[in-house]
Amino acid sequence: MLFNPADHTIECGDNDEFIKLSIPASQLLELLILSKGELVTRDYLLTEVWDKNGLRGSNNNLNQYMSILRRTLANHGCDNLFITIPKIGFRLNTDIKIETRAGPGDEGIAPANSSAQKKHMKELAILVISFLCIVIPLAGFILLKQFTSHYDITNSDLVEVAPGCHALYLHKFSDNEKLRAKIQINAMLSELKLKCDAGNTLLFDNIDPIPNDDDYGRTFLSFCNNVGEKTLANCTDFFYSAWKEPHE
């Protein structure tokens, strides 16, 4: 089978039959062949095949032409030339051998790893990193709540960390850690511009060992209102993946 992108035809070698492809289908085939097995995103294909030709494309258009292209190739003995990456794009099946022949005066188009394609890949990478930045701290907080030893408020030692303000430590601290925790809590309250008095109770934990410097690591603080002797409500939670004491 021989594909000629100049006139949008496929020549089937057995019977010299020529198949005329639509322009969008021909351009899609050429872009995917030039990608040499690299991922080609949907956004890139829509930009190159539709937007740059003054047309308005959509994922439905792309799916329709890819389906027609697959069916045309399959009817002439070329199955599974493309692999679909769900919701992202397509790539060439590198198990199928493809040879390119350059003729005189041929003009190639930009390969799929051109600046536009790289831009789309960069945007995808930023999206993934942003997602991880949200998920990882959340997972840390869930693990903190899951594995930390919790105490009934009536049976736990409330520590006065500021005049009238008490904190409940969610796991056992050494005497030195309690002192460091008190310093850290007051620094956090100052940074968050929170005033804690007799009407509040703080819940505090630090997953990492409290050091002797200003890097306290993974830290959890909950600022709660007292609504009864045993009841806390309207708590505002703060989780830091790497809290550091601010400097003036």
Image (cartoon, rainbow, N blue to C red):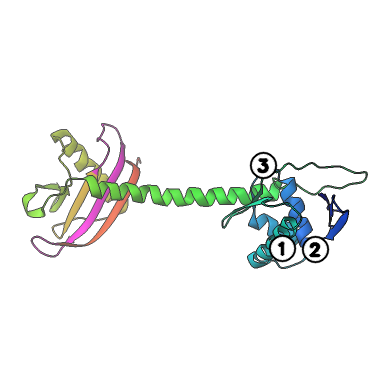
Q: Secondary structure at mark 2?
A: loop
Looking at the image, is mark 3 or mark 2 earlier in the sequence? 2
Q: Nearer the viewer, residue 91 or 108?
A: 91
Q: Which mark is residue 95?
A: 3
Going from N to C along the chain, the mark reached first, 3 or 1, is 1
Q: Nearer the viewer, residue 224 or 81?
A: 81
User: Residue 174 versus residue 64: which sits nearer the camera?
Assistant: 64
Residue at point 74%, 52% (across, down): 77
Indicate which label's residue lies in the foreground, 3 or 2. 3
Residue type for callout 3: Asp
Give me the C-alpha separation between circle 3 and circle 2.
26 Å
Establish if 237 lies above or below 59.
Answer: above
- Label 1 close to label 2 by CB (< 8 Å): yes
Residue 132 tag number: none
* Residue located at (28% from left, 47% from top): 143
Residue to which mark 1 is pinned = 68
Is residue 15 located in the magenta-colored stretch of the structure? no
Which residue was labeled with disc 2?
A: 22
Q: Please tell me which residue is depicted at 56% across the width and 56% down the height of the picture.
A: 86
Q: Amino acid at mark 1?
A: Ile
The magenta segment is: 206-231
Spot occupied by residue 25 in the image (x, y as percentages of width and height): 76, 60
Whole-percent x, y for residue 180 in the image? 21, 37
Report helix, strand or loop for mark 3.
Answer: loop
The C terminus sits in image quarter: top left
The percent position of residue 58, horizontal first and vertical second, equals 66, 66
Local crowd size for mark 1, using a 10 Å CA cut-off: few (<14), some (14–19), many (≥20):
some
Kindly indicate whether the residue at mark 1 contacts the one at mark 3 (C-beta within 8 angstroms). no
Q: Quick check: 94 above or below 28?
A: above
Disc tally is 3
